[in-house]
Image (cartoon, helix red, strand yellow):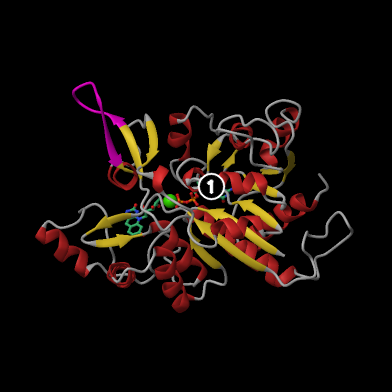
Amino acid sequence: PRVTVLAGGVGGSRFVRGLLHQLRTEWPAAAGGPEESMPGSGTAASVTVIANTGDDLWLAGLRVCPDLDSIMYALGGANDEERGWGRRGESERVSAELTAYGVGWPWFTLGDLDLGTHIARSSWLREGLPLSEATARLCARWNPGVALLPATDDEAETLVTVADEAGGTRQLHFEEWWVRHRAALPALAFTQHNVERARPAPGVLEAIAEADVVLFAPSNPVVSVGTILGIPGIADAVRQTAAPVVGISPIIGGAVVRGMADACLSAIGVETSAVAVGAHYGARGLPGAGLPGAGLLDGWLVDSADAAVAASAATGPLAGIRTLARPLWFHTVEETAAIAADALALAARPR
Ligand code: GDP
Ligand code: FO1
Ligand code: CA
């Protein structure tokens, strides 16, 4: 099957690693009865990841793409597993030099090895190549095992609106809000700068339209999946694809597993719960609850801890969405592969 995943950095890359493990070890042997067999079975498995580019920024004259790099390094086996971002075995000599010159952000560390990636990418961008082509060239070295596409080649950075001292508001880059302030400044709104001018990168709409299954990784619904869906044309492609669309909840038992999704969700008026996030994405073919237009999901995979609330929401907020409750913690790659298998099984259930 052709599987297309919308993904952010840490949650996205962990999930895709499990998905690849699942497809490589269980496919095609996993095909069970007709209900369990995957759409598109019979073809070789291929995975396209559409990555969030809202976290991207120019820093020290270089284009930094945190989520693309997190996915590329993680799937290429070069990531720092504990930190969740950047390269394993990293050193920070250049960063100290930049800080001594007052260049860049002293609280945002570009590691020496990671800087090689940013320099190579920026060099290609300055030659006039689009980000998607620069990403393909970087991936030629890391062999992530997926087609890794930026959501857009255009710059549409996520800005966070917070209160200022004078009683008004100001905007800061998402990375400043998250890394410098650790999400401690209450977020009033998230906006994508110049998003109205952004177009989906080459291959993005095709990957959604021609997929056998479309998955929303358990990534941040606002600043990862939300910003991908915010690029004009992408949400409509999800609404119109013939493939089943299944999301995996990043919220377990009313809490974010890690990160700042709760602060992001409250800014857009969505409760931090698996039911509320599923309802926010909405049921395909029905008027959307949160996003403009119709909803996006055929299926919503929630954690076993949320089984009862999801079942009781089936005739209310989650009406029109097939739900399945299974363990959703990414402890080992095998457990993560089982989550991916559950998502694919949910996608294969008849509508
Ligand atoms: P980021 O770009 O690095 O912030 O990563 P993503 O947006 O891809 O993913 C962040 C989300 O991953 C967080 O909101 C978490 O709720 C979610 N997450 C992290 N670990 C797990 C896990 O073990 N299981 C599930 N279901 N979600 C997780
Ligand atoms: N996260 C941090 O918490 N501190 C950093 O200094 C930092 C530097 C950094 C450099 C390159 C890169 O690709 C990612 C980096 N991150 C850093 C992670 C980044 O903040 C991610 O966007 C978040 O994890 C949210 O997606
Ligand atoms: Ca991110």
Image check: 157 left or right of 71? left
In the displayed structure, 279 sits above or below 210; it is above
Total of numbered circles in the picture?
Answer: 1
Which quarter of the rendered image does ligand 2 occupy? bottom left
Q: Residue furthest bottom?
A: 141
Of helix, strand and loop, which one carries label 1? loop
Residue 97 visible in the snapshot: yes
Please give the name of the residue rendered at 50% of the width and 43% of the height, measured from the top-left corner. Answer: 226
Please give the name of the residue rendered at 48% of the width and 63% of the height, measured from the top-left corner. Answer: 71
Image check: 307 left or right of 123? right
Q: Quadrant of residue 160?
A: top left
Please give the name of the residue rendered at 71% of the width and 25% of the height, measured from the top-left corner. Answer: 316
Q: Which residue is mark 1?
A: 233
Image check: 339 left or right of 148? right
Q: Specify start and end residues of the magenta stretch as a single range.
A: 162-172
Q: Quadrant of the N terminus?
A: bottom right
In the displayed structure, 221 sits above or below 80; it is above
Image check: 4 left or right of 110? right
Q: Residue furthest right?
A: 33
Report the front residue among 330 and 205: 205
Queried whether the magenta region covers residue 168, the answer comes back as yes
Residue 144, given in percent of the width and then of the height, sits at 52, 71
Q: Residue furthest left?
A: 101
Report the front residue among 194 and 66: 194
Q: Quadrant of the C terminus?
A: top right
- Mark 1 residue type: Gly
In the displayed structure, 162 sits above or below 300; it is above
Residue 184 visible in the snapshot: no
Queried whether the magenta region covers residue 47, the answer comes back as no
Residue 240, given in percent of the width and then of the height, sits at 66, 46
Residue 30, given in percent of the width and then of the height, sits at 80, 66
Q: Residues within 10 Å of mark 1 (few under 14, many from 20)?
A: some
